[in-house]
Image: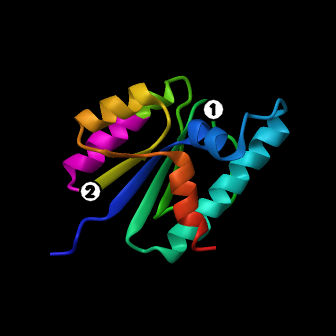
Amino acid sequence: MPQPLRTFVIDGSNAVYAVFGPWPETLKEQNRCAWDFISALNDWVLSAPEFSIELVFDGFYREIPAVNRERLRVIFSDEAKADSIILERIQSLIYFKEKVTLVTRDQDLAQEARRENAKILDPQKFWSMISRSF
């Protein structure tokens, strides 16, 4: 039987802020930061076949760079809170026997994810881990 995939569920805005600093004021600059982050995630996930990523952003759909959609899923919460989408995704993935790590600095969200048996990883540590493969 194949070993379950490890999925990183990433609190998008929280992780981008932790890695790149405060969100810029203009939407154009915010999108650039998000694009840089998504592009790096896509490069990494293509080189690490045992992992997949679900990246969840607050807000409505924005154009994103082309990604490997089988292994990097980008989700926008629309009118819902990203935290609720993140917890739903964690519950679903764990139900289907995947190993899940939540990437966030949000302590309340981390506590709820731990109750679902997800591991927690700080965004800076995650970024350091994937940056080694570049």
Q: Residue at x 64, y 62 (%)?
A: 40
Q: Is residue 121 left or right of residue 93?
A: right
Q: Is residue 126 above or below residue 13?
A: below
**Is residue 87 inside the magenta stretch?**
yes
Query: Mark 1 or mark 2, which has the lower sequence index?
Result: 1
- Name the quarter where the N terminus is drawn: bottom left
**Residue 133 percent across, percent down from the top left:** 57, 74
Q: Residues within 10 Å of mark 2 (few under 14, many from 20)?
A: some
Q: Residue at x 55, y 23 (%)?
A: 79
Q: Secondary structure at mark 1?
A: loop
**Front one among 95 and 48:** 48
Q: Secondary structure at mark 2?
A: loop
**Is residue 76 inside the magenta stretch?**
no
Residue type at mark 2 is: Glu
Q: Which residue is mark 2?
A: 98
Residue 12 figure quarter: top right
Q: Is residue 39 left or right of residue 109?
A: right
Residue 68 visible from this viewpoint: no
- Name the quarter where the C terminus is drawn: bottom right
Q: Which residues are magenta?
A: 86-97
Q: Main secondary structure of the magenta part?
A: helix
Q: Which residue is mark 1?
A: 60
**Front one among 39 and 102:** 102
**Residue 85 percent across, percent down from the top left:** 42, 33
**Front one among 122 and 26:** 122
**Residue 2 percent across, percent down from the top left:** 21, 74
Q: Is residue 53 above or below residue 76?
A: below
Q: Is residue 59 above or below residue 11?
A: above
Residue type at mark 1 is: Phe
> What is the C-alpha distance between the residues marked 1 and 2?
27 Å
